Amino acid sequence: MQKTNIKDGATYAPLGNAKPVVQPNEFFFSVAYLDHGHIYGQTNGLLQAGATLRYVFDSDPKRLEDFCQKYPQAIVAERFEQILSDDSTQLVVSAAIPNLRANIGKQVMLAGKDYFTDKSPFTTLEQLSEIKQIAKTTQRLYSVYYAERLHNEAAWHAGELIKQGAIGEVIQVINIAPHRLSKEKRPDWFFDKQQYGGILTDIGSHQVEQFLTYGDVQEASINFARVANVANADKPQLEDFGEVSMTASNGVSFYARVDWFTPDGQATWGDGRSFIMGTKGTIECRKYIDIGRQAPASKVFLSDADGEHEIDCLGQSSFPFFGELILDCIHRTENSMTQAHVFKAAELSMLAQRLADTQNQTS
């Protein structure tokens, strides 16, 4: 079952139904740079899929202490290089400050290991270009924790239903992604746009990844993109609202709204929803709350030729992505998520951010 702080998105770390794909001590991963609480979700997912945690590194003693209290099996590394040179570590997992994630991944891949970073994986298109080349040269995986689909039962189940043809051909994907700001708890980098990359680069990468998955999209054009600081003048580099529209090369349309306006009285940190329209039916995902009825919640509402169906997904998933990632690292496959998909989700979100930034500069 899911056990997590449902009020705080920064520490959201679901626990699913454990389904190991490897035996103990068969696949080792190490963890480095604990700047974002998503590191706990990444670690939980891999452990439940059977991976063995080896080292942890961070320069902050308090973050290290907290991590080791939760995962006492982790060996504290004195330097990041200790992880890079460790022959047993096959995958390095990181949730660093966003603008540092690409360079950490570069070091990991050049050391002959695979990399699993929190989203957003990049903050600039230049970083993406460099990592694409390094991935091609080293044949190492650069995987990304797009948790809003990979670590959410309803979002994952929606993808399975679509693959099964439950709503026919997808016509449109709409994602609504409000988050709780919790301003007083955030680190300084959270409010520095150079470090976090902008709201479309950051939260928007989740939404674009879902669009690519649900719509079977390989390429898309951006119709419009907008970002703003609506209500946080004391943090001038924070973007608390963003929206984007795209049209895929296969005709699927997409709209997403991302923001930091979850009200304090709401039981969960966000009311993330997806609305997916197909030629034979529709799907709505209520990913974290069913307002007025249940919190936490993870529900799919399906309408099709046979009627209306409410599917309760909470606690029903083993979150298969993590096991697939482990097996990809072992067998050199791309079944968890193709490298092209990883890069395209990041590229489109950053192109949308660039368009929004340009419009703000000229207005």
Image (spheres, rainbow, N blue to C red):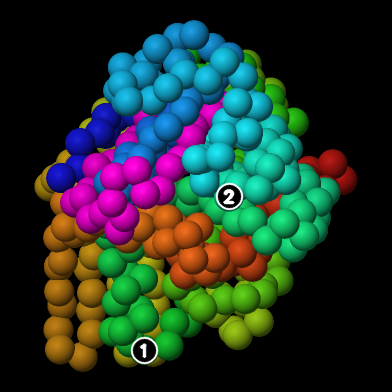
- Which element carries disc 1, helix, strand or loop? loop
Q: Is residue 360 visible?
A: yes
Residue 25 lies in quadrant: top left
Frontmost of labels 1 and 2 is 2
Q: Residue at x 35, y 79 (%)?
A: 162
Q: Is residue 273 visible?
A: no
> Is residue 134 found left or right of 9 in the rendered image?
right
Give the distance between the C-alpha atoms of the residues marked 1 and 2, in whole angstroms. 36 Å
Residue bearing the label numbered 1: 168
Pinpoint residue 219: horizontal percent, then vertical percent.
Answer: 67, 74
Q: Earlier in the sequence, mark 1 or mark 2?
A: 2
Q: Residue furthest front?
A: 87
Pinpoint residue 276: horizontal percent, then vertical percent.
Answer: 39, 72
> Is residue 300 found left or right of 110 in the rendered image?
left
Queried whether the magenta region covers residue 34, the answer comes back as yes
What residue type is disc 2 on? Answer: Asp
Q: Judge the density around disc 1: few (<14), some (14-19), many (≥20) Cα neighbours within 10 Å.
A: some
